[in-house]
Image (tube, grey):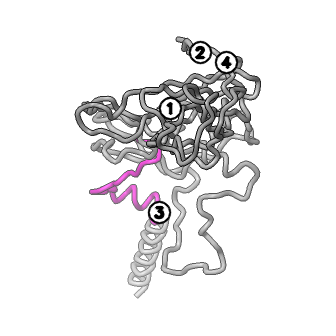
């Protein structure tokens, strides 16, 4: 919805001839004028002085660099029962072009001096008319929407707060997404019967702290795309990395050394991508353990050796 700008009739106050130019701001005592007026509403203060005649309304006008008027209006703020301020606020409303244009603008204020209070005599032709003028150059910035001027409340404000509870997506695998049940595994076929050496030795010449990065082209991007939040589908796709593109190898990926399968109780879901699997109460039949480790072949050879040895002993006994 658009805002209907408010306008003032141009009076050309800067062309009015006066007796005194208030160059030291001692008659009007204008304060708190912003160096730059931005779009919206701002305000400044006029304290006045005993040297001005009472019950004579001041004339105020601001013209931008093209001569268009900037809307100004005195407001009754702080003139109720309590508190009573010794100044009057003047509001200034700045609108974007073509209402107001940025650049230097001029503020002009006219008033009438009290001839009995000033320490000098006023010529007769300047008595009973506006005879003192205040002028100041200000800046208008119609491109700035951020208004940092203080907000004036005509009445004491009240605040009502309401709590709004919304769901939030987690950027890491949720710790509370878990299942329990029974698993069984199958070892890769070409690893069956191979014995691996174990020990506490360590290769100190190899740097394994790579921070999860890869030396291959596009390896870091691929690591990012394989994070849980993209793999699970809850966060959609990483549009930036998708547009960038990653060099892929079309060859088939090698099969895993071991595949875990789950019995009918529970299901693996996408929220568990990137999580951990804890296996307890591992039970491996003796025959399977010997077959997988390769010890079964050794046991067969040992049994055959014992049988051959026993047969040789029997033959030797017969010869005796």
Q: Mark 4 or mark 2, which has the lower sequence index?
A: 2
**Region in magenta:** 272-295
Pointer 4 and pointer 2: residues touching (CB < 8 Å)?
yes
When the figure is inspected, residue 303 is found, relative to residue 225, above or below; the finding is: below
When the figure is inspected, residue 280 is found, relative to residue 137, above or below; the finding is: below
SS class, disc 2: loop
| Image quadrant where residue 34 sits | top right
Q: Residues within 10 Å of mark 4 (few under 14, many from 20)?
A: some
Q: Residues within 10 Å of mark 1 (few under 14, many from 20)?
A: few
- Marks 4 and 1 sit apart, C-alpha to C-alpha, by 51 Å
Query: In this view of the protein, which residue sits in the foreground, 162 or 260?
Result: 162
Residue matched to label 4: 99
Pointer 3 and pointer 2: residues touching (CB < 8 Å)?
no
The mark closer to the camera, 2 or 1, is 2
Number of the label disc, if any, that sits on residue 233: 1
Quadrant containing the C terminus in the rendered view: bottom left
When the figure is inspected, residue 192 is found, relative to residue 136, above or below; the finding is: below
Q: Residue at x 37, y 57 (%)?
A: 287
- Marks 4 and 2 sit apart, C-alpha to C-alpha, by 9 Å
Residue 22, horizontal then vertical, whole percent = 62, 43
Pointer 2 and pointer 1: residues touching (CB < 8 Å)?
no
Number of the label disc, if any, that sits on residue 7: 2
Residue 82, horizontal then vertical, whole percent = 24, 37
């Amino acid at each position: 919805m658009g805002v209907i700008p408010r306008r003032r009739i141009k009076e050309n106050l800067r062309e009015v001839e006066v007796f005194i130019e208030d160059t030291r701001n001692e008659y009007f005592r204008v304060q708190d004028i912003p160096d730059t007026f931005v779009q919206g509403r701002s305000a400044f203060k006029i304290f006045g002085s005993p040297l001005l005649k009472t019950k004579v309304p001041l004339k105020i006008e601001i013209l931008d660099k093209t001569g268009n008027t900037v809307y100004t209006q005195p407001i009754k703020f702080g003139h109720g029962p309590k508190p009573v301020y010794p100044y009057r606020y003047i509001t200034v409303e700045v609108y974007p072009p073509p209402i107001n244009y940025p650049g230097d603008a001029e503020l002009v204020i006219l008033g009438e001096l009290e001839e009995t209070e000033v320490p000098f005599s006023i010529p007769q032709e300047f008595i009973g008319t506006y005879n003192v003028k205040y002028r100041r150059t200000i800046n208008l910035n119609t491109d700035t929407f951020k208004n940092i001027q203080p907000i004036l409340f005509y009445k004491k404000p009240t605040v009502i707060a309401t709590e709004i509870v919304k769901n939030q997506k987690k950027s890491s695998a949720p710790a509370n997404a878990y299942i329990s049940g029974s698993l069984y595994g199958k070892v890769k076929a070409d690893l069956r019967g191979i014995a691996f050496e174990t020990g506490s030795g360590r290769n100190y010449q190899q740097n394994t702290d790579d921070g999860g990065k890869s030396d291959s082209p596009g390896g870091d991007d691929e690591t990012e795309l394989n994070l849980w939040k993209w793999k699970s589908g809850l966060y959609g796709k990483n549009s930036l990395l998708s547009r960038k593109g990653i060099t892929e190898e079309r060859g088939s990926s090698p099969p895993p050394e071991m595949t875990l399968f789950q019995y009918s109780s529970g299901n693996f879901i996408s929220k568990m991508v990137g999580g951990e699997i804890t296996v307890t109460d591992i039970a491996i039949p003796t025959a399977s353990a010997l077959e997988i480790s390769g010890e079964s072949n050794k046991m067969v050879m040992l049994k055959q050796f014992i049988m051959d040895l026993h047969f040789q002993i029997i033959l030797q006994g017969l010869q005796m």
